[in-house]
C-alpha cells in the first residue's frame, strides 16, 4: 500500500494538489475523507481513490482506465455521462449481482468503447432520454439489466458519492462529463451525482459543480427511486431522444394548496405507503430522436439523427416515470432501499397526488444517504 501511495503522490505537483484530503494521505488515519472531498482533473486521476483498508475499504476496482483495462472483466470505477450515445451506468462486477450485495464494488458499463470500461451489449437499452438542463444532465430509460450484470429480478437501488459512511458506492467511484452546463465542453468531474438501477429501469443525474442550491442531486431519497428523484417520461417510452429540458423541482419538495412542502424520508417505507404527491415531469424541447441501432453504432464512431422534433413537450401529467396505471406490472428503478435484496418494486396508484409504494423488505442493510 505504501508503494501505491508513493506512486500517487509522486505523479506530479498537479496531482498532489488535487489529491488534497490530509486524513486520506495518512495511512494511519482512522477514517478516510468523504468521497465528495476528492477533486480531480481527468488527466490526474489516481490509480485508486481509496486504496486504504479502513472501514469498507480498500476499493475493489481502479480509476485509471484505458485500452488495457477495457473489456468484459474490467474493474473500472470511473464513468462518463456525455450524451445519449456516450454514457455509463454502475453495474455488477459479477453475473446476476444484486445491488444490495455489490453496491461498494459496482463497476462502469458504458454504451460504447473508449473509456476502459465494460461495454453494454447491443440490445441492453430499450429506451433512453438524455436531458440537458441549466443545472444538471440526466439520462433515464428502460433496459435489460442483465446487460450490466444484474440479476433480472433485482429491484435495485441507488449508487451515489455518499453512503452511510460517506465513502461512496462504489467506494472510490468517479464520474466525469464533457456536457455539464457551465463547463463549455471541458471534461470535468461531476462531484454530485446519483444513479438508480433495477426493476429494468435506470436513471442517472450529474449536477453542475457551480450550482449547489437548490440541490438537484440530493441523495436522501433512495427509497422512492427514479420516479421521484428524476421524473421522466422515458420509463414508459421506448424512444431514444436527446433534449433540452426545464429544471425539475428539487427532490423531496412538492406543492400543496399553493404551499411548497418538504417530504422527509423515514428509515423504511412499509408496504402500501401513500406519498402525498405525484412528481411532475419537467417540460422538454429541441428533442432529437434516434434509433436503437444508432446508439450501438460503435464501429462508425457515433450516431446521426433520424428525426428531429421541435417545440416543447408537455409537462408531466401525473403518470410519473416508471409508474404503471392501475397496479400493472412495470417496475420503477431503485424503488427498494439500497442494501436490500429481492425487494419488490413499487406499484403506483392512479389518483392525482397519490402514489402507493409497495416495498417488501427482505433484509435491510445500510441506506445510501
Image (spheres, helix red, strand yellow):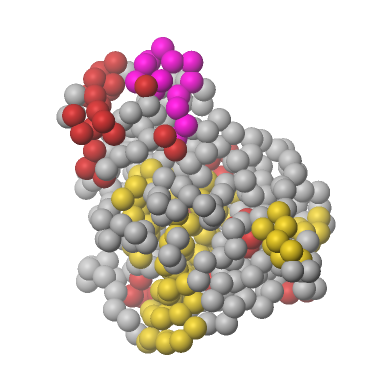
Residue 361 vs 143, above or below: the answer is: above
Q: Nearer the viewer, residue 322 or 369?
A: 369
Percent x, y of residue 318: 69, 74
Q: Residue furthest left?
A: 12
Q: Residue 305 in magenta?
A: no
Instruction: Classify the position of the C terminus by image quarter.
Output: top right
Find the magenta span and give its range. 23-35
Q: Is residue 232 left or right of 170 when viewed as pictured?
A: right
Count up the numbered dots. Answer: 0
* Residue at horizontal 47 percent and vertical 72 percent from the top: 245
**To which quarter of the image does residue 348 belong?**
bottom right
Whether residue 95 appears in this view of the structure is no
Q: Nearer the viewer, residue 131 or 54?
A: 131
The quadrant in which the N terminus is found is top left
Q: Name the main secondary structure of what is drawn in magenta.
A: loop
- Residue 186 lies, in percent from the top left, at 26, 56
Give left or right: position of 206 versus 336.
left
The image position of residue 230, as x and y in percent, is 56, 61
**Front position in the image: 282 or 256:** 256
Q: Is residue 215 found left or right of 75 in the rendered image?
A: right
Q: List x then y, in percent, for residue 234.
A: 54, 72
Residue at 62% in and 76% down: 316
Amino acid at each position: 500500500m505504501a508503494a501505491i501511495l508513493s506512486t500517487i503522490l509522486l505523479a506530479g505537483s498537479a496531482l498532489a494538489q488535487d489529491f488534497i484530503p490530509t486524513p486520506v494521505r495518512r495511512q494511519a488515519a482512522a477514517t478516510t475523507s468523504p468521497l465528495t472531498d476528492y477533486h480531480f482533473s481527468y488527466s490526474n486521476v489516481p490509480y485508486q481513490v481509496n486504496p486504504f483498508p479502513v472501514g469498507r475499504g480498500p476499493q475493489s476496482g481502479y480509476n485509471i482506465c484505458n485500452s488495457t483495462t477495457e473489456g468484459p472483466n474490467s474493474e473500472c470505477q470511473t464513468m462518463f455521462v456525455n450524451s445519449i450515445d456516450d454514457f455509463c451506468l454502475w453495474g455488477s462486477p459479477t453475473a446476476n449481482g444484486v445491488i444490495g450485495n455489490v453496491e461498494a464494488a459496482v463497476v462502469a458499463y458504458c454504451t460504447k468503447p473508449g473509456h476502459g470500461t465494460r461495454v453494454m451489449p447491443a440490445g441492453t437499452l430499450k429506451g433512453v432520454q438524455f436531458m440537458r438542463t441549466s443545472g444538471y444532465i440526466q439520462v433515464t430509460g428502460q433496459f435489460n439489466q442483465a446487460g450490466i450484470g444484474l440479476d433480472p429480478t433485482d429491484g435495485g437501488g441507488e449508487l451515489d458519492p455518499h453512503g452511510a459512511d460517506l465513502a461512496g458506492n462504489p467506494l472510490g467511484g468517479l464520474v466525469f462529463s464533457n456536457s455539464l452546463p457551465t463547463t463549455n465542453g471541458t471534461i470535468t468531474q461531476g462531484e454530485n451525482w446519483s444513479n438508480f438501477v433495477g426493476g429494468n429501469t435506470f436513471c442517472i443525474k450529474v449536477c453542475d459543480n457551480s450550482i449547489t442550491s437548490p440541490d438537484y442531486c440530493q441523495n436522501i431519497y433512495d427509497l422512492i427511486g427514479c420516479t421521484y428523484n428524476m421524473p421522466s417520461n422515458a420509463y414508459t417510452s421506448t424512444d431514444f431522444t436527446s433534449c433540452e429540458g426545464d429544471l425539475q423541482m428539487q427532490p423531496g419538495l412538492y406543492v400543496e394548496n399553493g404551499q411548497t412542502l418538504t417530504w422527509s424520508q423515514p428509515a423504511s417505507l412499509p408496504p402500501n405507503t401513500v406519498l402525498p404527491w405525484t412528481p411532475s415531469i419537467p417540460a422538454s424541447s429541441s428533442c432529437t430522436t434516434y434509433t436503437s441501432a444508432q446508439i450501438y453504432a460503435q464501429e462508425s464512431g457515433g450516431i446521426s439523427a433520424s428525426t428531429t422534433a421541435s417545440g416543447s413537450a408537455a409537462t408531466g401529467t401525473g403518470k410519473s416515470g416508471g409508474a404503471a396505471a392501475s397496479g400493472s406490472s412495470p417496475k420503477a428503478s431503485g424503488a427498494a432501499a439500497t442494501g436490500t435484496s429481492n425487494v419488490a418494486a413499487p406499484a403506483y396508484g392512479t389518483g392525482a397526488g397519490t402514489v402507493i409504494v409497495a416495498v417488501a423488505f427482505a433484509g435491510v442493510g445500510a441506506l445510501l444517504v
